[in-house]
């Protein structure tokens, strides 16, 4: 699979999100993510605004669905999303409902293993229940809480190779990565590179980060796209 650069628009203002997305696309970013803060602030209107401004561009709706899976996925698909996110710690029926909605409405489903006691088993379940992608995710609160307690902050890289090896669908690593770490995730077999808080968005204020965002994103895109075809999965039988 050719690597993809995705920017997570973890913003709460629609105008700022559209401006940041415009900058990102100009820099070469492939996918736009309507981040959870953006969906909470702007909902379906925000996704529709992204679709209107960026026809033909993949849009990930980071719903973090836990229940009501079919309806949530259907609504986002009709608003213009091409990908939706469901949590593997939801009930299995919820994942099945989101997957069915994805098939019915032509959107891809990304399963998120945040909070799983066994992250590798969570990734396997995501694939087994029919999702199209795995999001291997160490959460914002988890990272900050562990760091505040004086312990080593966990990283998605800790088990990324094991997750990639366990499944045959593309993997995305999210949560507390530095820019350099994010850019190198294709080396682990994870071709979906996410740039978001705090890399492109200030993690505390949920506003666009200061500095030359377009220049930084352009360099990231050039480096990620230079990997060429990335072998996906461990061909698990």
Image (cartoon, rainbow, N blue to C red):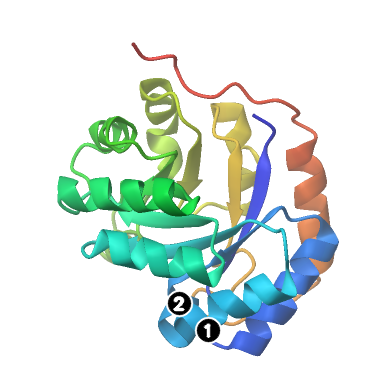
Q: Residue at x 17, y 48 (%)?
A: 93
Q: Can see residue 114?
A: yes
Quadrant housing residue 29: bottom right
Q: Residues within 10 Å of mark 2 (few under 14, many from 20)?
A: many
- Pointer 1 residue: 45
9 on left or right of 117: right
216 and 26: which one is in front?
26
* Residue 208 visible in the snapshot: no
| Secondary structure under the numbered disc 1 in the rendered image | helix
- How far across and down, in percent of the image, does residue 45 sit? 53, 84
The tag on residue 60 is none
Q: CA distance from mark 1 to mark 2?
A: 9 Å
Residue position for label 2: 39
Q: Residue furthest front?
A: 104
| Residue under the point 45% across and 86% down | 41
Relative side of 197 to 134, left or right: right
Q: Residues within 10 Å of mark 1 (few under 14, many from 20)?
A: few
Query: Which part of the image, by quadrant, shows the N terminus?
Result: top right
**Which residue appears at 81% of the width and 55% of the height?**
28
Q: Above or below — where is 65 with respect to 2? A: below
Q: Is residue 129 above or below residue 218?
A: above
Q: Nearer the viewer, residue 196 or 124?
A: 124
Asked whether the beta carbons under mark 1 and mark 2 sit within 8 Å of each other, the answer is: no
Dot 2: element: helix
Image depth: mark 1 or mark 2 in front: 1
Q: Is residue 190 above or below residue 64?
A: above
Quarter of the image where one finds residue 223: top right
Quadrant of the snapshot with the C terminus: top left
**Where is residue 2 shown, x and y percent of the image?**
69, 33
């Amino acid at each position: 699979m050719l690597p993809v650069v995705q920017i997570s628009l973890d913003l709460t203002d629609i105008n700022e999100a559209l401006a940041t997305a415009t900058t990102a696309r100009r820099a070469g970013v492939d996918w736009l993510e309507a981040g959870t803060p953006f969906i909470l602030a702007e909902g379906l209107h925000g996704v529709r605004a992204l679709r209107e401004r960026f026809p033909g561009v993949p849009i990930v709706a980071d719903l973090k669905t836990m229940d009501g899976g079919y309806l949530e996925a259907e609504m986002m698909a009709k608003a213009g999303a091409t990908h939706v996110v469901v949590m593997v710690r939801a009930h299995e029926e919820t994942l099945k409902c989101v997957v069915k909605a994805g098939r019915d409405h032509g959107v891809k489903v990304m399963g998120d293993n945040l909070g799983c006691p066994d992250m590798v088993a969570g990734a396997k379940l995501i694939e087994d229940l029919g999702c199209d992608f795995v999001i291997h995710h160490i959460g914002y609160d988890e990272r900050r809480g562990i760091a505040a307690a004086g312990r080593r902050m966990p990283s998605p890289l800790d088990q990324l190779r094991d997750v990639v090896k366990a499944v045959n669908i593309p993997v995305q690593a999210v949560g507390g990565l530095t820019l350099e770490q994010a850019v190198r995730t294709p080396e682990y077999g994870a071709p979906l590179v996410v740039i978001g808080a705090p890399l492109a968005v200030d993690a505390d204020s949920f506003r666009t980060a200061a500095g030359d965002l377009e220049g930084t994103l352009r360099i990231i895109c050039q480096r990620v796209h230079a990997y060429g075809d990335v072998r996906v999965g461990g061909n698990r039988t």
